[in-house]
Image (cartoon, grey):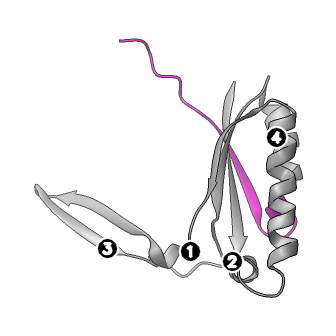
Amino acid sequence: MKFMILPYETEAAFADRENANAGRYWGAWSAYGQALAEAGVMVDGAGLKRVLTATTVRLRDGRRHVQDGPFAEAKEQLGGYFVIDVADLDAALEWAARCPSATDAGVEVRPLVEMPPR
């Protein structure tokens, strides 16, 4: 079963990407990604830039409306994603618990929808 692991991070964690703590920050994420890969469960993954770089598109009355971020004040923001292929939800939750952001923010786990064949 495929699951998406969505790590949320605090503003301080995003700052750690670029300050004196960058080595520790990236080391933890590299170790996590390597553990997923070595276990053979990693399908895909990437980090995301800060929410202030985001753009949302909505169609209203046939017209495109574009909004630049940030959209709402939040203490945590989506920091990236991992797609893993594991036996069940319990296995996905075990991997989520090992995610670096589980200690100071949160990690959302969602099963992926399997599209029916066309």
Question: What is the x, y in percent for residue 77?
Answer: 62, 70
Residue holding disc 3 = 67
Residue 102 in sight from this viewpoint: no
Disc 1 marks which residue? 50
Name the mark on residue 36: 4
Which quarter of the rendering shows the C terminus?
A: top left
Which residue is tagged 2? 14
Assess whether mark 1 and mark 3 are in contact (beta carbons under 8 angstroms).
Answer: no
Question: Splitting the image into 4 quarters, where does residue 68 fall?
Answer: bottom left
Mark 4 burial class by Cα count in 10 Å: few <14, some 14-19, many 20+: some
Q: Residue at x 17, y 62 (%)?
A: 64
Amino acid under disc 3? Gln
Chain-order first, disc 4 or disc 2: 2
Q: Nearer the viewer, residue 97 or 25?
A: 25
Give the residue at x 87% y 50%.
97
Q: Residue at x 80, y 38 (%)?
A: 37
**Please, what is the three-letter code of the amino acid marked with disc 1?**
Arg
Image quadrant containing the N terminus: top right
Region in magenta: 99-118
Residue placed most toward the observer, 88 or 46? 46
The answer to whether the residues at label 1 and label 2 have Cβ atoms under 8 Å apart is: yes
3 left or right of 91? left
